[in-house]
Image: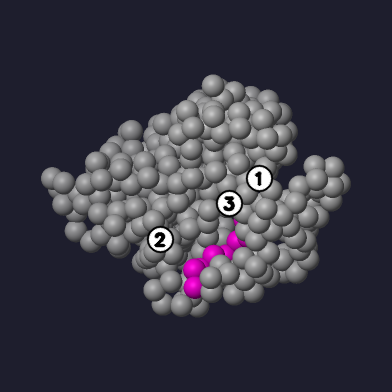
Amino acid sequence: MENIGHGGKEIVERVMPKAAAIKRVEELKAAKVKTLDVRLQMATEVIDIAYGFFSPLEGFMTKADVESVCDNMLLADGKTVWSIPIVFDISEEELKKSGIKQYDEVLLTYTGNPFAVFDITDIYTLDKKEVAMKVYGTTEDKHPGVKRTYQYQDKFLGGKITLLNPPKINEPFTRFWLTPKQMRERFKEKGWEMIINHQTRNVPHTGHEWLMKGAYLGAYGSMMVDKPRGGILVNAIIGSKRPGDYIDEAIILCQEAQGKHGYFREDIFLTTCSLWDMRYAGPREAVFHACLRTNLGCTHHMFGRDHAGVGSYYDPYDAHRIFNKLPKGSLNITPIFNLDWWFCPVCDEVTYMGFCGHKDKKASFSGTLIRSIIQDGVKPPRRIFRPEVFDMIMECAKKYGFGDAFVTEDYLKRRNPVFTIEPLK
Ligand SMILES: [Zn+2]
């Protein structure tokens, strides 16, 4: 039972062993099958599908799936909850030029190297505006998820994929990227039965730290001193970045630093990453995150204020309310809803919206405040940032960010890729 993922099905793993993959590529080349070189966005999702991060998906969605996801937040089977379309786009021109037809087998390459086989079962078009409205609740292209939707080419290919050539995950991410099956093995080694996921794309200040601690106590109750049966999984989202985001390296290494320096006992704390381009779909993305973390083997998932939101497109607690609207038993993970944590000068501590009666005196951990602290580079009080975490931000800025802890155009151009696909041999 341990490898049962979202939708109550065995975790998908569509990865061909190396010797068989080499042979398969030779056969495909001999048969002169069509080849498509994919961009980073698509390569990321091929990897996610192949290792079961998107279980029970076995490939890119067909039109029936996309329509059902948009209209009912269910796959075309009519019962599996799914909130965000996972699609493979291609331009009309490229489709014509390649001569790809329904039921073709296509060899996907990435950076020119053989990567995956794509069994095309559906070729279709979508009304992008309609998709945007249904998934994101807006058609404004200022919304990054809507913008991504509009940037898709005009044709879409649906069908199963099989990975031929596993990615090489580059430093410093190597030790943090675990497939769903590897993740579950790690939990077993740790003896964890209760796993609380913390979704993040931030470097942690003490507000985040207390968010996790509060969720742990809320879900877990008593702490077993000799052998805790549960832990916190920090699963950082690593993917396409926007200028002003934290650089990926700082996110992952600073999260890890909290465990390394004892702010969490290492036997209850694990930092990992998953590859995903944030869509900022607010409530729908919260549901997607719940499915993703079910596949990782988590039993609980934290949802804070404005989870996966952007601008003022969603009410800050819409991502909590959506879970009440899902059919009972459709998710195999328990959401933990967090309100705000802030610093209160009267309580003289980091405290919780649910406790502190000095709301008018609170000092929120606003993004602007935290950003200015980091940009000044002057060590803030340890109540706001743990000194080891802050030192790590500065180190990452120097080592990986070309002097900046936040994403710049320069970083986007010069950074070391998170993964590469090497020649298959
Ligand atoms: Zn207070």
Comparing 31 with 175, the one in front is 31
> Image quadrant for the N terminus?
bottom left
Q: Nearer the viewer, mark 3 or mark 1?
A: 1
Q: Characterize the magenta stretch by its predominant secondary structure.
A: loop
Q: Are marks 1 and 2 in contact (CB under 8 Å)?
A: no
* Amino acid type, callout 3: Lys
* Amino acid type, callout 1: Glu
| Residue bearing mark 2 | 9
Q: Residues within 10 Å of mark 3 (few under 14, many from 20)?
A: many
Q: Relative to 374, say whether 53 is above or below.
A: below
* Segment tinted magenta in the rendering: 79-86
| Residue bearing mark 1 | 105
Which of marks 1 and 3 precedes in the sequence?
1
Q: Nearer the viewer, mark 2 or mark 3?
A: 3
Q: Residue furthest left?
A: 226
Return the x and y of residue 30 as percentages of the image width and height: 67, 30
- Quarter of the image for residue 68 reads bottom right
Return the x and y of residue 230 as percentages of the image width and height: 25, 52
Which of marks 3 and 2 precedes in the sequence?
2
Q: Is residue 281 left or right of residue 339?
A: right
Q: Is mark 3 within 8 Å of ligand 1?
A: no
Q: How many marks?
A: 3
Badge 2 element: loop
